[in-house]
């Protein structure tokens, strides 16, 4: 991997002539336009001791790294992933690239292969990729239908412990909301999630009794002090309106925990009046929305022999304009729901900028992979570049948004506690023995 800098090995040093997003620091900047500014950064004992206009800190005779205008970003927050599905593509690809094809392929692979060893090795492989790219916090959704939940959640807890000094891990339960029709399912899975310190959730779709199921989920979460994270309306059908029903349930139940809704694709297919009614409700609840642009552009509107007519993403600009918290995330990685990806948030931001038009100006859109998801996940200490914070940084040769988005694979250095990490990526061959085709 090509590095951007070779930082000094001392505990106290300067990063000079850095370019920082103004939205992500309370430090002093020489503003340079499009939400960016120049500064020097003092690193001390693994933390950010100061962020000051260029030259202010240089009279102390400290060792320094010259960035020549290179961007500095905080460690990334990937708030919606599926580590348990990751990297099964070689043994179980999606036969046609469709959503239904993905569901069927994953169901088959889960039943045949998802042992504790299989999960642990694939999930650890994915975490090593994310770490090398500069991610410091991940929420993963975990398939939680029986009997898989009894296998997956203990593995998740082991990995969360083993990775605690590198990546903060959160887990969210994933299952179809129709499973709430099964007597005893909800209290059982809610108890498992609470025991693991996880997040309750479900995949919602427009089934009979959905409002009652949502009330039950909100009540189960409130009783156990859990947050909620839903997969919502991942379809082109404009009749899919469970986002509005979730907002209504949150208000009806006076829920005080955090709520995240992912995907929300069908909103982009609805008429303006319906969109306004839904977003007005969402804004009242304080819930956050995460878009998964790479995965949804891959899956949505896919029909053999026909060019897709829409991009599959939700209305992030309209949500942000109403003050609704918004973010983007990786979603699936090398599995039947998305054949590609490497949990690289720079690739994601670059693609999201193109797909969602997060440009001209970029402004504070970098927030969607940094401080916005950190806040939505309940850890506002991550995702910023403030004095007093930990020096978990990603340093680039790219000097502005155009250079970063045009060349996302360009030189970068990942600092953890102010020290550069080994950015060598794991070799796919490590997983070859797990990839026997069904």
Image (cartoon, rainbow, N blue to C red):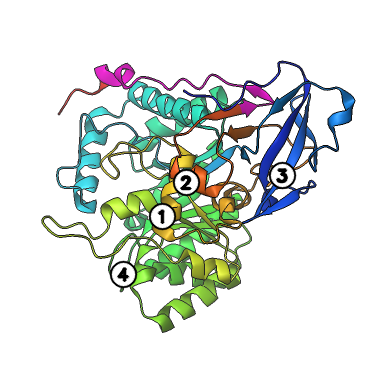
Image quadrant where residue 178 sits: bottom left
The residue singled out by tag 3 in the image is 38
- Residue located farthest toward the bottom when viewing the structure as drawn: 273
Q: Residue at x 38, y 42 (%)?
A: 144
Q: SS class of the residue under badge 4?
A: loop
Instruction: Please name which of the two marks, 2 or 4, marks the residue nearer to the observer.
Output: 2
Judge by depth and name the residue closer to the eye, 120 or 7: 7
How far, Cα to Cα, is label 2 from label 4?
A: 44 Å
* 355 vs 331: above or below: below
Per the model, the C-alpha gap separating discs 1 and 2 is 9 Å
Q: Earlier in the sequence, mark 1 or mark 2?
A: 1
Q: Position of residue 297 (x, y in %)?
A: 31, 54
Residue 298: image location, x then y, percent: 28, 51
Numbered range of the magenta stretch: 415-433
Foreground residue among 310 and 114? 310
Residue under numbered circle 1: 354
Q: Are marks 1 and 2 in contact (CB under 8 Å)?
A: yes
Residue at left 33%, top 69%? 240
Of the residues under marks 4 and 3, which one precedes in the sequence? 3
User: Residue tagged by mark 2?
Assistant: 405
Q: Quadrant of residue 4?
A: top right
Q: Is residue 253 above or below residue 30?
A: below
In terms of secondary structure, where does tag 3 sit?
strand
Residue position marked by numbered label 4 in the rendering = 208
Mark found first going from the N terminus, 1 or 4: 4
State which tag comes first along the sequence, 1 or 3. 3
Locate residue 356, reporting x and y percent. Answer: 43, 59
Inter-mark Cα distance, 2 to 3: 19 Å
């Amino acid at each position: 991997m090509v590095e951007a800098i070779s930082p000094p090995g001392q505990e106290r040093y300067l990063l000079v002539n850095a370019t920082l997003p103004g939205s992500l620091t309370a430090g002093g900047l020489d503003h340079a336009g499009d939400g960016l500014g120049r500064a020097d950064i003092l690193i001390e004992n693994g933390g950010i001791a100061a962020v000051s206009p260029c030259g202010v800190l240089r009279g102390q005779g400290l060792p320094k790294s010259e960035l020549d205008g290179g961007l500095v970003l905080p460690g990334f927050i990937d708030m919606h992933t599926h580590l348990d599905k990751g990297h099964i593509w070689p043994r179980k690809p999606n036969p046609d690239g469709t959503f239904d094809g993905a569901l069927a392929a994953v169901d088959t692979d889960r039943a045949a292969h998802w042992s504790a060893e299989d999960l642990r090795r694939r999930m650890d492989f994915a975490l090593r990729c994310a770490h090398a790219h500069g991610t410091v916090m991940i929420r993963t959704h975990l398939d939680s239908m029986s009997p898989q939940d009894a296998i997956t959640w203990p593995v998740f807890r082991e990995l969360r412990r083993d990775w605690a000094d590198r990546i903060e891990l959160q887990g969210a339960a994933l299952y179809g909301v129709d499973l709430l029709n099964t007597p005893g399912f909800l209290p059982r899975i809610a108890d498992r999630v609470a025991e693991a310190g996880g997040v309750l959730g479900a995949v919602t779709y427009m089934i009979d009794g959905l409002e009652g199921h949502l009330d039950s989920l909100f009540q189960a979460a409130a009783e156990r002090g859990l947050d909620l994270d839903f997969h919502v309306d991942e379809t082109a059908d404009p009749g899919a309106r469970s986002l509005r029903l979730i907002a209504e349930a949150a208000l009806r139940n006076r829920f005080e925990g955090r709520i995240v809704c992912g995907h929300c694709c069908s909103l982009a297919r609805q008429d303006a009046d319906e969109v306004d009614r839904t977003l007005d409700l969402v804004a009242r609840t304080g819930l956050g929305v995460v878009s998964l642009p790479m995965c949804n552009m891959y899956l949505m509107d896919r029909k053999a022999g026909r060019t897709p007519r829409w991009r599959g993403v939700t209305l992030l600009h309209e949500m942000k304009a109403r003050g609704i918290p918004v973010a983007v995330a990786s979603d699936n990685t090398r599995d039947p729901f998305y054949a590609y990806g490497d949990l690289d948030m720079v690739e994601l931001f670059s693609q999201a900028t193109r797909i969602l038009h997060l440009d001209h100006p970029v402004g504070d859109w970098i927030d969607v992979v940094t401080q916005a998801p950190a806040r939505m996940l309940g850890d506002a200490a991550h995702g910023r570049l403030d004095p007093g914070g930990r020096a978990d940084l990603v340093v680039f040769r790219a000097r502005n948004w155009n250079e970063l988005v045009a060349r996302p694979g360009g030189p970068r250095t990942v600092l953890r506690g102010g020290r550069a990490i080994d950015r060598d990526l794991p070799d796919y061959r490590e997983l070859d023995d797990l990839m026997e085709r069904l």
